[in-house]
Image: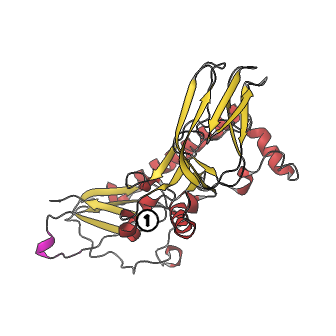
Amino acid sequence: MANSNELRLPKLIGDGMILQREQPNKIWGYIGEGKKVTVKFVNTIYETEGNREGKWEVCLKPLPDGGPYNMEIKADKTIIIQNILMGDLWICGGQSNMELPVSRVMERYRDEINSYVNPLIRMFKVPMAYDFEAPQEELIEGYWQPLTKRNVQDFTATGYFFAKKLFEKYQVPIGLIHTAVGGTPAEAWISEEGLKAMPEYIEQIAKYKNKDYIRQVLDKDEERINQWLQRLDNLDRGMRSKESRWFEVDYEDKDWATIQLPTIWKNEEMYLDAGVVWFRKKVNIPASMIKKQARILLGTIIDSDTVYINGQKIGETGYQYPPRIYDIPQGF
C-alpha cells in the first residue's frame, strides 16, 4: 500500500469513469493531514486539503453530458485521470438475475451482441467480498471497462440490454456500477443502523463480527459438502459398476426406464429427494457431421451435472444456474 501521507485515489475514481451529468459529483481520495490538494477539471480549479483522518474531497459543479475529459489531481505528486465522460450512472444491484453475465446469454443473442460495440457505455464491476465488522471505504480491486467485443462477456446481461436501450433513447454516455451478488438476502444490503428495528438481525451481526465464528461456519460448511460429495461418489452405481460404467458406449441399458424430458423431476415416479440420476440417449447424426466441431445445449439442470459423449467426458457444472453449453472438439 502507498504511504498514508501520499496522494492516493479509490479504485472507483480512475481512467474511463463516467460521472453523473447535471448533478454535483464528489471526488475524493487520501493524503496526509493538512496537505494541499488541487483538482483541475473542465476549466475549473478546486482546492482542498487532507483532514485528520487522512482524507480529502471536492465537489465538482454540475456539467451537461459530454467528454471525453481529463482530470488533474495534484499534491505531492500529480495524477491524471483520462477519458472521463459525463452521462447517466446506474447501480446494478440485486441477486443472480442481475449478476448473470452476458456470456451466459450468448447462444440466444450472439448476433446482436457481436455486432454491437459502444465505448460510451461503460461498467465498473465491484468485486465480491464481505466484511461484517464495518462498512468498507475502499474496494480491493476494480476498473472502468468500455463496452467492446473483448469486455462484453463480463457485463451484467440485464445491465447490458438496459444500457443499450437507454443509449438508443437518450444518446448520452451510460455508466453501470455492477454490484450484484447471487443469493444475497435483502438484509445483507441494509446498514447496521437500518437493521436496528429488527433485533434478530442485530443478533446475527454480533455473531458475524467474530472472525473465529465465521471461520468455524466456513470450515463446517466445507466439511459437510465434501462429505456429501464423497458419499455420492461412493454410492454411485454408475461409476462403481463391476460390469461396465454407465457412461461407456458398450454398457447395456435395455432394462432402463424411459422418461420424457424436459420435466419437473419431483413429479416423476422415479423421483429421489437427493442423489445421483443417470440418463442415456442415443443420437444418430449424418455422415456430413462426423468429426466436425459441435456443441450440445442442455439448458439448466438442478443441481449439478457431468456429460459424457461416446464414453468421454465433455463437460461438467457444479451448480444450478448456468445453462449447460458444452463444446465437442473437432474430430471427437
- Disc 1 packing (10 Å; few <14; some 14–19; many ≥20): some
In the rendered image, residue 287 lying in the magenta stretch gets the answer yes
**Placement of 314 over or under 37, stated as above or below:** below
**Placement of 326 over or under 144, stated as above or below:** below
Q: Range of the magenta residues?
A: 283-290
Say left or right for 183 vs 49.
left
Taking depth in this image into account, of 200 and 239 the one nearest to the observer is: 200
The residue wearing badge 1 is: 105
Q: Assign the magenta stretch its main secondary structure.
A: loop
Q: Residue furthest front?
A: 43
Q: Which residue lies furthest to the left in this view?
A: 287
Residue 243 visible in the shown view = no
Residue 109: x and y in percent read 40, 69
In the rendered image, residue 39 lying in the magenta stretch gets the answer no
Residue 197: x and y in percent read 88, 52
Question: What element does badge 1 sit on?
Answer: helix
Which residue is located at x 26 percent, y 76 percent? 254
Residue 206, picture quadrant: top right
Which residue is located at x 82 percent, y 45 percent? 202
Say left or right for 222 vs 119.
right
**Placement of 155 over or under 220, stated as above or below:** below
Taking depth in this image into account, of 21 and 11 the one nearest to the observer is: 21
- Quarter holding the C terminus? bottom left
- Quarter holding the N terminus? top right
**Placement of 126 over or under 148, stated as above or below:** above
Taking depth in this image into account, of 6 and 126 the one nearest to the observer is: 6
Residue 320: x and y in percent read 49, 61
Residue 180: x and y in percent read 60, 54
Residue 54 visible in the shown view = yes
Which residue is located at x 49 percent, y 65 percent? 302
Taking depth in this image into account, of 58 and 242 the one nearest to the observer is: 58
Three-letter code for the amino acid on which mark 1 is drawn: Val
